[in-house]
Amino acid sequence: MSETPARYCGNCGNELDPEDQFCQNCGRPVHRTASVPTPEADVPVPPPPQQEARTQPLEQTEAQPRGPWSTGRLVLGCLGVFFVVFVVGACLAALAGNGGGTEGEKNKKSGGGKDSAPKPALVVSSPSGSPTVTKDSIEVKGKVTPANSKVTVNGEGVIPDDDGSFSTPFHLNVGENYIQITAVKGSEQADASRTVTRKLSEKEIAAQGAAEEKAKKGEPQVQKNEEQPQAEQKPIPKPEPRPKPEYRVRPQSGACRDVDTFTGSGETRTDTPFFTIVGPHWRVVYESVNTAPPPVEGMLGFFIRNERGDLLDPNGVAVEGDNSGIKNVISDPGQYYIQIITAEVDWTIRVEDCGNTTT
């Protein structure tokens, strides 16, 4: 009786029993193989057909891991497509919602919505109807609801009171006067109109008739208020020229000596030339003659300054009309000048040095 050759698993090399259909070590299906022990090695030698049979499962085994990866990618792709569809749908819904709001805003502004501003109610109480008056003005009165509406009368704005009532004067010309009253609230507007006819009063008719009668007779129409100013205007007499008098204030005989004399008339603003004073005592003799028409009086004023321009007396001298006098001065020897300011007078100023004279 021949001995059954030993079999080994072609996958893990585990020894197999004759009746085994699966490897007890790795669980792989067992094909009947022949293993021939040799002195070189104890390696199973499967026959060629069985070798091809084992090769096909090995290729399938290598291809098996690709199946789960393809399925996972398919699942991820489906999830990605679903997410993109969801995002796009949400964006379209948001745009549709904004469009609806914009349409609502448009409806609201155009008055199609419930929140649109109501049309203002305008009631005009005066004038009523189409009256005829003789006054040159009339009071336009009324009431508007809501009270914050914008009211205009012939384009002129009128501010309503808190209760919506308004009143404004309106000037009337002779003849028909058209009055347009408008109330505006938002995009809504209410209008009212009145026609007022103005006629001349009895006094105006009488005055107009009298003027026409005078025009027919050729009488000049001169208003009294224009004649009165002409009657009151009188020519202003020119003052008679007065001779220039000699000095009414004369120096004491032998007390002082003349240094220089300056004269002028009218409006003057000038400085005299320098003059030399030995001093220390000297004086300025002045006189003015008024040339202005009465009751106006002219003016003479002057200041004494040294050669550096310093004032000897900050107050100076100032007189009006016909006047004369003496200004006594005490100063060191040196050069001086006089600053003169006059208006509508004839004037004379004389400088006398009294420091080196003997009586």
Image (cartoon, helix red, strand yellow):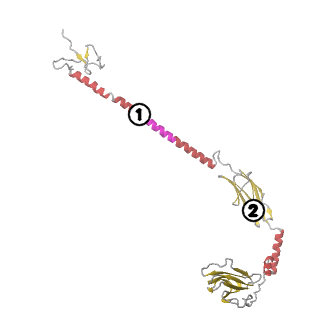
Q: Position of residue 13 (x, y in %)?
A: 25, 20
Q: Which amino acid does the dot numbered 2 rest on?
A: Phe
Is 113 left or right of 80, judged from the image as shown? right
Q: Position of residue 269 (x, y in %)?
A: 65, 82
- Classified by dominant secondary structure, the portion drawn in magenta counts as helix
In terms of depth relative to the viewer, which is nearer, 249 or 223? 249
> Which disc is residue 76 wearing?
1
Q: Position of residue 22 (x, y in %)?
A: 29, 17
Separation (CA) of disc 2 from disc 1: 83 Å
Q: Quadrant of residue 220?
A: bottom right
Image quarter in which the N terminus is found: top left
Q: Which amino acid does the dot numbered 1 rest on?
A: Leu
- The region drawn magenta spans 74-92
Q: Quadrant of residue 356?
A: bottom right
> Which disc is residue 170 wearing?
2
Residue sitting farthest toward the front: 358
For the question of whether residue 206 can be seen, the reply is yes
Name the residue: 82% across, 73% down. 207
Name the residue: 30% across, 28% down. 62
- Is residue 300 shown above or below 97? below
